[in-house]
Image (cartoon, rainbow, N blue to C red):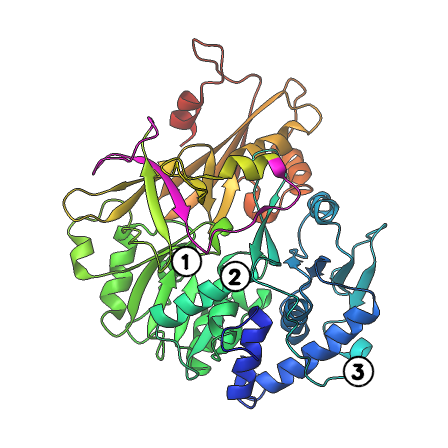
């Protein structure tokens, strides 16, 4: 085995050799899965996948909740070079079929507990209460790292909201993850004594940090299932009982804990780093958390798009950040091997205090969108400042500025209609498309508001047929995941227009805020 890993599983093999009996997954004080056990289980699954004709490059869909089998499936896919993608079991049928139709998986692992008829696909139904029955007879001896799987091969596909009305799948490579794992280890001084939380859903890109920063560095991971996440008291109690040391979530979840007054100066008893990202954390709320937990716990604001392996900057919060409570904390500088370029509207490097679009470069920039050539070409571009050779960058669509006084990078807004809501990146156009497909709706606008740390989506629709908001909500819920369904729906006979004949979004926003 080479000193430098060929791929992510090659890296995992080194972790196993260093500590096969160390805890990989911690479900409770008594239920622990060691690295050796996880590897043997994943080898059984890999043998099963090979028998089913799975080869390098074949896609595998995981429509499962968190369980040991789900994590072992991920490792098995990494072993074989078969990129996986996770689908929320609660997603509407239309959305699931779009993702399956786009990626054309060779196998779909689907939970018996959340049945869904998937004609046209090879489906393996999994009883998540009896996870291992179907694979018990397969060999569990550890597989050698497949050297045919190289850095440029796809590791996983992560779906994110798309402006066409359907989600798009960002493809990340083994090389992306190898760089990311190395950065996470150095940035947070990860050791085998660390215990990470996994409160983020596996279909959400924040989970990339949870799984890869922990497991691939030999640290332990504590998964939190959907039922536990509905009880904030149980979440915080479990974090303390299982002695978690590194926590990562969207700000919304922490703000929810704060709103319920569940966070006290003794909360997160063993945690040394609380990391948050996926949306802005209003400083008025963040200060309360800082005052409660600092300096015992460091607070770190991270930023990064799905297309760039989850995180591309990290900023540690200090008392100096609260000289003013307006806005959000800075994004910080780029992580190791990353480049930030801020271009103004003229396509030139933005001056200090001048807002511009953020372009990202480096080995964490993904491979593009799966089977979306035009979208990929629009977002993954030649660096416009490089004329002599090819350098690929990702155009985030985020508007940022570098402050003149201290050089810190601050988020300003979006170039398009994309928003961050409950940590999810959402194209408002996708919501509007879903609304317009409902019979009887003539026009639709989706608006987004941030107030006191809470994010709200409001839909204003025009109809001449006397529709009821309950019926509209029910129909749109059949095509959109729950986090994208508007909190409020307003019905009008027609939407107001501006002088150009376009829908007056400014008036609507001021009226319905």
Residue 175, numbered label: 2
- Residue 419 lies in what quarter of the image? top left
Q: Position of residue 128 (x, y in %)?
A: 72, 72
What kind of element bears circle 2? helix
Sequence-first tag of 1 and 3: 3
Q: Which residue is painted at 64% across and 65% down in the image?
A: 149
What kind of element bears circle 1? helix
Considering depth in this image, is 302 or 3 the residue closer to the camera? 3
Residue 136, numbered label: 3
Considering depth in this image, is 51 or 450 the residue closer to the camera? 51
List the residue tagged with mark 1.
Answer: 256
Q: Residues within 10 Å of mark 1 (few under 14, many from 20)?
A: some
Q: Residues within 10 Å of mark 2 (few under 14, many from 20)?
A: many
- Residue 442 lies in what quarter of the image? top right
Q: Is residue 370 above or below residue 66?
A: above
Q: Is residue 360 magenta?
A: yes
- Residue 164 lies in what quarter of the image? top right
- Chain part drawn in magenta: 345-373
Q: Position of residue 171 (x, y in %)?
A: 59, 52
Q: Is residue 315 left or right of residue 151?
A: left
Structural distance between the alpha carbons of marks 1 and 3: 42 Å
Quadrant that contains the C terminus: top left
């Amino acid at each position: 085995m080479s000193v430098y890993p060929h791929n992510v599983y090659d890296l995992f093999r080194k972790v196993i050799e260093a500590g096969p009996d160390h805890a990989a997954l911690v479900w409770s004080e008594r239920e622990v899965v060691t690295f050796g056990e996880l590897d043997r289980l994943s080898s059984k699954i890999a043998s099963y996948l090979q028998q089913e004709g799975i080869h390098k490059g074949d896609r595998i869909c995981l429509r499962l909740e968190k369980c040991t089998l789900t994590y072992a499936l991920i490792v098995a896919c990494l072993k074989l070079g078969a990129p996986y993608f996770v689908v929320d079991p609660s997603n509407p049928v239309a959305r699931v079929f779009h993702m399956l139709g786009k990626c054309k998986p060779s196998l779909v692992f689907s939970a018996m507990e959340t049945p869904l008829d998937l004609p046209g696909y090879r489906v393996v139904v999994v009883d998540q209460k009896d996870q291992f029955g179907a694979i018990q007879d397969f060999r569990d001896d550890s597989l050698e790292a497949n050297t045919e799987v190289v850095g440029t091969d796809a590791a996983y596909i992560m779906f994110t909201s798309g402006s066409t009305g359907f989600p798009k799948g960002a493809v990340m490579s083994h090389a992306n993850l190898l760089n990311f794992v190395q950065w996470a280890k150095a940035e947070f001084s990860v050791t085998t004594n660390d215990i990470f939380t996994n409160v983020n859903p596996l279909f959400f890109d924040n989970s990339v940090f949870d799984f890869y920063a922990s497991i691939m560095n030999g640290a332990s991971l504590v998964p939190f299932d959907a039922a536990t996440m509905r009880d904030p008291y149980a979440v915080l109690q479990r974090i303390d009982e299982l002695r978690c040391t590194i926590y990562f979530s969207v700000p919304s979840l922490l703000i929810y804990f704060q709103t319920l007054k569940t966070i006290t100066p003794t909360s997160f008893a063993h945690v040394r780093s609380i990391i948050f990202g996926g949306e802005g954390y209003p400083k008025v709320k963040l200060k309360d958390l800082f005052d409660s937990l600092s300096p015992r716990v460091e607070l770190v604001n991270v930023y990064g798009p799905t297309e760039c392996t989850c995180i591309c900057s990290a900023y540690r919060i200090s008392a100096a950040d609260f000289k003013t409570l307006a806005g959000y904390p800075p994004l910080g500088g780029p992580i190791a091997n990353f480049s930030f370029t801020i271009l103004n509207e003229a396509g030139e490097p933005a001056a200090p205090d001048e807002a511009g679009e953020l372009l990202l470069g480096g080995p964490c920039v993904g491979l593009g969108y799966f089977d979306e050539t035009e979208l990929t070409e629009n977002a993954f571009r030649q660096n416009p400042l490089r004329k002599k050779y090819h350098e690929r960058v990702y155009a985030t669509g985020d508007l940022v500025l570098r402050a003149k006084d201290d050089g810190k990078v601050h988020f300003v807004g979006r170039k398009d209609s994309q928003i961050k809501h409950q940590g999810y990146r959402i194209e408002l156009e996708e919501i509007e498309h879903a609304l317009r497909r409902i019979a009887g709706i003539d026009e639709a606008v989706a608006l987004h508001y941030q107030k006191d740390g809470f994010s709200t989506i409001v839909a204003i629709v025009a109809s001449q047929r006397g529709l009821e908001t309950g019926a509209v909500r029910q129909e749109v819920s059949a095509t959109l995941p729950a986090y994208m369904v508007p909190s409020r729906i307003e019905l009008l006979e027609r939407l107001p227009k501006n002088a150009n004949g376009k829908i007056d979004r400014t008036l609507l926003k001021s009226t319905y805020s």
